[in-house]
Amino acid sequence: MGRLLLSTCALALAVGCAPSVVDMPFDSDGDGLMDLDEQEIGTDPFLDDSDGDGHLDGFEVDEGADPINAEDYPYAGGYGIDRSCRDTLTATGNAVGDVTDNFSLLDQHGDQVKLWDFCGRAVLLVAGAFW
Amino acid sequence: MQAAYEQYRDSGLMIIGLYTETNEYELPTSEDLQGWADTYGLTFAVTADDAAVWTRFEVDYGIPSLTLLGPGAVVVAADDMGAVSKIPEALPD
């Protein structure tokens, strides 16, 4: 719920002008998040893309991304991201049982796909060529 | 691979295609990748492997090559064409 100041002037000329506060849902920047929710999350209620990564704050929240971190965004491909362990990983090698290093590669939607954005999931890597 | 993606996606599987070159032996562009994905109906990530990621896993027989990672990016099967059958055991709890 946001708070909106309403002037009663137009409605109550007979009794004089007085501002009043009305509780109502309000999304000032139209990003899908209510202003009070934005205050709690830390996003700007008057900026629809607080971290400037090209995705609306509300969409990022819905998709599990961080709307105040430009490096953290939903993929256009709609992949099921799970970054829950990303910041705890340390690469150890590439043999069975090792933690393999992160990578960032261009995908068919023009996004950079980062392996560790899926660290909470199993990942099948399929190497091939167009021929 | 698309069938495996559709079968296990909601259980915690991601598939990343690592494409090394086009028919003209060039690194695929985003448009090339989109065309490839559209042609074969692929909805998982189809990427241009300009970092030679696929060579990390001691690939013996070239491409195609499959490598399966469990949660935490832990290698479960490296350069293993039987990796698809191991997907269920690699899925998160």
Image (cartoon, grey):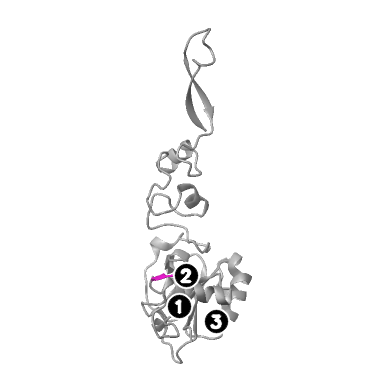
Residues in magenta? Answer: A103-107
Q: Secondary structure at mark 2?
A: loop
| Residue B35 image point, x, y percent | 51, 74
> Looking at the rendering, which quadrant does residue B90 occupy?
bottom right
Same chain, labels 3 and 2: no
Q: Residue at x 60, y 81 (%)?
A: B85
Q: Which residue is mark 1?
A: B18
Q: Secondary structure at mark 1?
A: strand
| Residue B63 image point, x, y percent | 47, 87
Query: Is residue B88 visible in this depiction of the protein?
Result: no
Spatial separation of the CA atoms under disc 1 and disc 3: 15 Å
Q: Is A9 above or below relative to A39? A: above
Q: Residue at x 37, y 55 (%)?
A: A70
What chain letter is assigned to the residue under label 2?
Answer: A
What chain letter is assigned to the residue under label 3?
Answer: B
| Residue A68 image point, x, y percent | 39, 49
Same chain, labels 1 and 3: yes
Q: Which residue is mark 2?
A: A108
Q: Which residue is mark 3?
A: B83
What residue occupies the far top of the structure in this picture? A14
Q: Secondary structure at mark 3?
A: helix
A4 displayed left or right of B93: left
Q: Amino acid at mark 2?
A: Gln
Tell me if label 3 and label 2 are in contact, CB under 8 Å: no
Same chain, labels 1 and 2: no
How many marks are shown on the rendered structure? 3
> In this orientation, which residue lies closer to the viewer: A5 or A93?
A5
Spatial separation of the CA atoms under disc 1 and disc 2: 11 Å
Tell me if label 1 and label 2 are in contact, CB under 8 Å: no
Image quadrant containing the N terminus of chain B: bottom right
Spatial separation of the CA atoms under disc 3 and disc 2: 24 Å
